[in-house]
């Protein structure tokens, strides 16, 4: 267990010390509707890890409440993931479907208590009646049905007497609740589909919010740990258990931040799209972030667990750089795997002054790895080196083989070029070299100084192998879908050459191919006759290097653009434009820059006026129109916009009401621009409501302060500039959802305490 305990472990310890629970019981409850991914690995690590740390147990439960999407193949994949990561679940695998009879009886009880009713509104009507984040909802007229009518309808729903969508069972809670999840949530829906375990016994299936908490209770779960997206669902969790007055002890829900990784998608829908459209070879494609994909690529269970441990457990969602995961696998393999030589792009080399065969012993591990092991490599007249290790016209700083520069063959001798042989196209096809017999590695008396050693393999003993060079599946840091696929995510090299010991001795299944990266014997397609190796990860993070170079280019371009803007001049305003400019600056009190943008563009000005008619927020709407809307009108006609002045007005109101922050408003606008959705609906669906509750923000501030003790000391010593650092860290940790005013007040209060 970590010496520094995370907030979940502190909760568990407090509950044990107070006597609230005698034994810790957690659970990992995935839906069997897809293969588990790296986000599930984090959840597995947390739930099983906490149970292990406190001598408790963790259940593996399949949340199989949607028969249209579930499959036994997904169940097996989930079981395999848990076991591969090294955890053991308590007893047998559990299924929510095991509890369908009991859940049904509790639903009957809620109906009898007047706390649930059968609703017959359409899906659109339910959405309309629900209200918005700023206005209360309206209860369905069907909520007035008697207990007897509800019981009769619910039984008929169970017996299959109605079509899908004709009726639903809903909880009767509060249609004006600020937490919209409490506005009479759905408890059961009709599904005429065969369940992979229950068969055709049921025509109704419980919703997550009803089944989850009660399944936890049945299993004696103490700490129901889930991701932050279910934070608002906690109120339903508590309502169901409290309303049914279940005998203690009862479970309580606790949330942690879900895992997000750049250059990666973890939406099951998007992963399924990749599989079904054959963008990838299957759920275990080594480019996917599924556990099966990582396993097939060659990742170790320990590297995944180390990654989960490294990123920690937080209370606010954030995005982790994928290079952290890549570092964890490099770090794990560096201490374990043997080093061997592999020639990716072979170039024939003939040693003119050597005849015969010599066996050279070469260690598998460098001196800093405390492992023993070696193999014999054959040195003979004809060898192969990599084409990149020879340059006829080298650039400055090139230290490998050239016509005028000798080089050492690793573990062997120094060679010098005598002749370069080319084909009719001018391509180099062979080098004639001589070797120095006194230069053998480890007993060199030649006195020749060389600047590097290169890889090689001997012609007759080398084995031909296929290399699958995997790279990141997406080229964009925040991919949205198939359009962001990296076309170079898989490169297949058919004729690489490798030392024979790799194939013959099989000392391991993972190797470091020196200078190329870490590789894994492909578990499905490998054979001794046709060996295949998957590239797990490179030796260095080339992506970040390229990204830094791109950032530098963008900065230079930005500077160039700025210079152009400074030197340029705008045409003089027309009388009409000047009149508008004066109105915007003098009457509406807009700043000169925004007034200038609006006054000079007739379409933009009209859009601004139309938006103000809907909601009179002069400055907020001006900012949105002059920035976001103006950007779109540079490349589109007004009738091509997917959003309207009315929607921009609604977005402005959400900002003014502090429902969302200005930063989140940009994200909402992007959605409006892409699909024309209502801004309030986007905020509701994505859970983007601004966080102003000190009970949520204070723990994040505490975490930031505890992580930065040196900066706290400097602040208290008078470096007030660091105040902005702490505010920025909190806003970043909440993905911009925290209310900046509240954050400023709370940070100051904690730092000055």
Image (cartoon, rainbow, N blue to C red):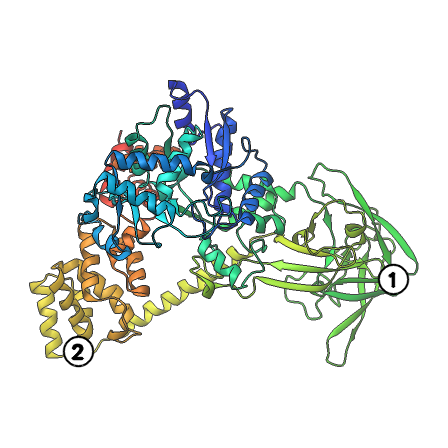
Rendered position, 657 above or below 314: below
Q: Is residue 140 visible?
A: no
Q: Nearer the viewer, residue 244 or 581?
A: 244
Q: Using a 10 Å C-alpha cutoff, classify the residue at mark 1 as few (fewer than 14 neighbours), some (14 to 19) or many (20 or more).
A: some
Front one among 14 and 336: 14
Residue at the spot of label 1: 381
Question: Front-most of 395 and 386?
Answer: 386
Circle count:
2
Residue 298 image offset from top left, x and y in percent: 63, 49
Q: Secondary structure at mark 1?
A: loop
Looking at the rendered image, the disc whose residue lies closer to the viewer, 2 or 1, is 1
**Badge 2 is on which residue?**
572
Residue 584 sits above or below residue 657 on the image:
below
Q: Residue furthest bottom?
A: 424
Vertical relation: 651 (above or below) 395: above
CA–CA distance in space, label 2 to label 1: 80 Å
The residue located at (42%, 45%) in the rendering is 202
Q: Quadrant of the C terminus?
A: top left
Q: Quick one: SS at disc 2?
A: loop
Tell me if I can see residue 94 in this picture: yes
Q: Position of residue 602 (x, y in %)?
A: 17, 75
Q: In the figure, residue 344 lies in which quadrant?
A: bottom right
Instruction: Tell me the residue at 31%/61% (across/down).
Output: 670
Q: Residue 100, image x and y in percent? A: 42, 39
Q: Pinpoint residue 679: horizontal percent, then vertical percent.
A: 25, 57
Location of residue 593 by image quarter: bottom left
With respect to residue 576, does 522 lie above or below? Answer: above
User: Residue reaching furthest left?
Assistant: 587
Residue neighbourhood size for the residue with mark 2, other residues' Cα within 10 Å, grouped as few (<14), some (14–19), many (≥20): few
Horizontal side of 243 relative to 338 (left or right) equals: left
Upstream in sequence: badge 2 or badge 1:
1
């Amino acid at each position: 267990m970590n010496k520094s305990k995370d907030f979940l472990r502190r909760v568990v310890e407090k509950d044990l010390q107070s006597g609230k629970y005698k034994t810790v019981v957690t659970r990992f409850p995935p839906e069997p509707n897809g293969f588990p991914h790296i986000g599930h690995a984090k959840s597995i690590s947390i739930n099983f890890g906490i149970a292990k740390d406190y001598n408790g147990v963790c259940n593996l439960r399949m949340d199989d409440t949607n028969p249209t999407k579930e499959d036994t193949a997904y169940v097996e994949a989930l079981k395999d993931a848990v076991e591969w990561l090294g955890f053991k679940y308590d007893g047998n695998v559990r299924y929510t479907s095991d509890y369908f009879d009991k859940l049904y009886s509790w639903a009957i009880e809620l109906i009898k208590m007047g706390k649930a009713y059968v609703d017959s509104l359409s899906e659109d009507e339910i959405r309309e009646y629900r209200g918005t984040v700023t206005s209360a909802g309206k209860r369905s007229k069907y909520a007035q049905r008697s207990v007897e009518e509800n019981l009769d309808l619910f039984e008929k729903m169970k017996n299959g007497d109605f079509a899908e969508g004709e009726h639903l069972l809903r909880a009767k809670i509060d249609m004006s609740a600020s937490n919209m999840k409490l506005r009479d949530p759905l408890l059961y829906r009709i599904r005429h589909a065969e369940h992979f375990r229950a068969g055709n016994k049921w025509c109704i299936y419980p919703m997550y919010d009803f089944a989850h908490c009660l399944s936890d209770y049945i299993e004696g779960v103490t700490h129901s740990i889930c991701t932050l997206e279910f934070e608002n669902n906690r109120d339903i969790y508590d309502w169901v258990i409290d309303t049914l007055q279940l005998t203690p002890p009862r479970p309580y829900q606790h949330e942690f931040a879900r895992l997000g990784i750049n250059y990666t998608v973890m939406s099951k829908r998007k992963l399924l799209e990749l599989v079904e459209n054959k963008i990838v070879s299957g759920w275990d494609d080594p480019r996917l972030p599924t556990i099966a994909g990582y396993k097939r690529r060659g990742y170790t269970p320990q590297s995944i667990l180390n990654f989960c441990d490294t990123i920690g457990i937080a209370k606010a969602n954030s995005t982790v750089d994928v290079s952290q995961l890549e570092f964890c696998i490099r770090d794990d393999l560096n201490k374990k795997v043997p080093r061997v030589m592999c020639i990716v792009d072979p170039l024939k080399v003939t040693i003119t002054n050597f005849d015969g065969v010599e066996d050279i012993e070469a260690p598998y591990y460098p001196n800093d790895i405390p492992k023993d092991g070696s193999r014999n490599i054959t040195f003979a007249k004809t060898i192969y080196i990599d084409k990149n290790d020879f340059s006829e016209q080298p650039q400055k700083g090139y230290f490998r083989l050239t016509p005028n520069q000798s080089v050492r063959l690793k573990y062997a001798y120094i060679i010098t070029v005598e002749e370069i042989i080319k084909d009719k196209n001018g391509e180099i096809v062979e080098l004639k070299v001589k070797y120095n017999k006194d230069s053998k590695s480890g007993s060199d008396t030649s006195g020749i100084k060389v600047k590097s050693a290169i890889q090689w393999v001997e012609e007759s003993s080398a084995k031909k192998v296929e290399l699958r060079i995997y790279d990141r599946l997406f080229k964009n840091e925040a991919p949205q879908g198939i359009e962001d696929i990296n076309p170079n995510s898989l490169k297949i090299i058919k004729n690489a050459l490798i030392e024979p010991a790799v194939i013959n001795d099989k000392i391991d299944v993972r190797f470091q191919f020196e200078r190329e990266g870490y590789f894994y014997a492909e578990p499905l397609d490998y054979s001794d006759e046709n060996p295949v190796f998957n590239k797990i990860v490179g030796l260095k993070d080339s992506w970040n290097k390229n990204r830094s170079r791109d950032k530098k280019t963008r900065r230079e371009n930005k500077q160039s653009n700025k210079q152009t803007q400074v030197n340029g001049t705008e045409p003089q305003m027309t009388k009409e434009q000047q009149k508008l400019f004066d109105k915007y600056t003098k009457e509406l009190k807009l700043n000169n820059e925004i007034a200038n943008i609006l006054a000079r563009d007739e379409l933009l000005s009209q859009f601004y006026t139309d938006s103000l008619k809907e909601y009179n927020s002069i400055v907020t709407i001006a900012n949105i129109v002059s920035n976001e809307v103006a950007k779109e009108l540079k490349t589109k006609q007004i009738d091509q916009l997917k959003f309207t002045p009315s929607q921009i007005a609604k977005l402005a109101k959400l900002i003014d009401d502090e429902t969302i922050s200005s930063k989140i408003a940009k994200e909402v606008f992007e959605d409006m621009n892409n699909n024309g959705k209502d801004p309030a609906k986007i905020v509701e669906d994505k859970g983007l409501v601004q966080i102003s509750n000190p009970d949520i923000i204070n723990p994040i501030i505490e975490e930031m302060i505890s992580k930065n003790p040196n900066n706290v000391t400097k602040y208290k010593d008078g470096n007030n500039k660091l105040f902005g650092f702490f505010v920025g860290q909190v806003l970043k940790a909440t993905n911009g959802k925290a209310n900046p005013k509240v954050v400023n007040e709370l940070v100051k209060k904690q730092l000055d305490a």
